[in-house]
Image: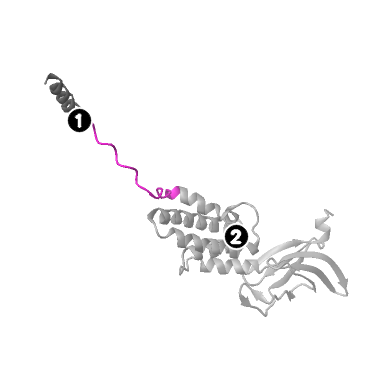
């Protein structure tokens, strides 16, 4: 009888001890997605995908369609969450800053690219339509090199070579003061039939030539061979 009571007592103690222990924690949930990256993390990722636009080096215009396509993909993927939208707004501010700085530096290729990227990030916005048109006009102004002069009677002929900023096509001309030249097939996306450049005057003893870019009334000087050689 004593043995039975002892066994019963120990059993009761075991039950009480078991009841006093805390329940085991529930198993961890399965297949829980990781937390969404912060706006700053997403911003760093999407900005790096457009790095050619923000870099200090020159921009190859052949890269612009790819940048615009990437910008459209960024907008589609980041517009669905609050963190993504914040990252997108941060990127848009950077693109606008890029347009402004490159315009001040007369880097018109990057200005044009920045405007197109902005349009991809902000479809329907015409905020930079005027700036994009200005970039088209400035990109249509070719690089000009004065290669020589020739006297013929009372006339001085100027020999020039133009290089298209976009296609790299070169053309040669023989013109006099006051004459117009250089009529590319297109200015931006628009067809063109008029001469864009005019010789204003020869400077000094054929040291340079002053040329007008008629579309924007922009006048600049191009050195002649003598000035380039330091003569």
Quadrant where the C terminus is found in the figure = bottom right
Query: Is 112 left or right of 173, judged from the image as shown?
Result: left
- Identify the colour scheme used: one colour
Where does label 1 land, which residue? Answer: 20
Query: Is 155 left or right of 129, judged from the image as shown?
Result: right
As measured in the structure, the alpha-carbon distance from the residue carrying label 2 to the one carrying label 1 is 73 Å
Q: How many numbered markers are drawn?
A: 2
> What percent of the width, then of the height, locates residue 19?
19, 32
> What percent of the width, then of the height, locates residue 187?
64, 73
Q: Nearer the viewer, residue 67 or 144?
A: 67
Please identify, in this view, whether the residue under mark 2 or under mark 1 is nearer the observer.
1
Element type where label 1 sits in the image: helix
Where does label 2 land, which residue? Answer: 110
> What percent of the width, then of the height, locates residue 128?
51, 65
Decide whether residue 33 is among the magenta residues.
yes
- Give the magenta-colored segment's residue range: 17-40
At horizontal 60% and vertical 60% (from top left) the residue drawn is: 110
Residue lying at the far left in this picture: please name it: 1
> What percent of the width, then of the height, locates residue 46?
51, 54
Decide whether residue 60 is among the magenta residues.
no
At horizontal 46% and vertical 63% (from top left) the residue drawn is: 76
Q: Nearer the viewer, residue 229 or 61?
A: 61
Q: Nearer the viewer, residue 168 or 159?
A: 168
The disc at residue 117 is none
At horizontal 52% and vertical 57% (from top left) the residue drawn is: 95
Could you tell which of marks 2 and 1 lies nearer the N-terminus?
1
Image position of 48 with respect to 219: above or below? above
């Amino acid at each position: 009888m004593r043995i039975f009571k002892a066994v019963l007592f120990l059993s009761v103690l075991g039950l009480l001890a078991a009841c006093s222990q805390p329940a085991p924690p529930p198993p961890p949930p399965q297949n829980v997605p990781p937390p969404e990256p912060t706006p700053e993390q997403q911003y760093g990722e999407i900005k790096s995908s457009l790095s050619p636009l923000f870099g200090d080096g020159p921009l190859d215009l052949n890269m612009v369609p790819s940048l615009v396509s990437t910008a459209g993909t960024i907008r589609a993927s980041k517009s669905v969450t609050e963190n993504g939208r914040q990252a997108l707004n941060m990127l848009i501010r950077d693109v606008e800053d890029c347009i402004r700085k490159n315009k001040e530096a007369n880097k018109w290729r990057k200005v044009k690219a920045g405007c197109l990227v902005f349009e991809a990030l902000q479809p329907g916005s015409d905020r930079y339509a005027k700036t994009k048109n200005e970039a088209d006009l400035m990109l249509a102004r070719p690089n000009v090199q004065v290669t020589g002069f020739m006297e013929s009677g009372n006339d001085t002929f100027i020999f020039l070579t133009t290089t298209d900023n976009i296609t790299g096509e070169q053309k040669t001309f023989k013109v006099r003061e006051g004459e117009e030249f250089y009529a590319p097939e297109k200015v931006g996306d628009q067809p063109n039939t008029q001469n864009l450049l005019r010789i204003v005057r020869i400077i000094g003893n054929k040291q340079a030539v002053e040329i007008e870019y008629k579309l924007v009334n922009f006048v600049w000087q191009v050195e002649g061979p003598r000035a380039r050689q330091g003569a």
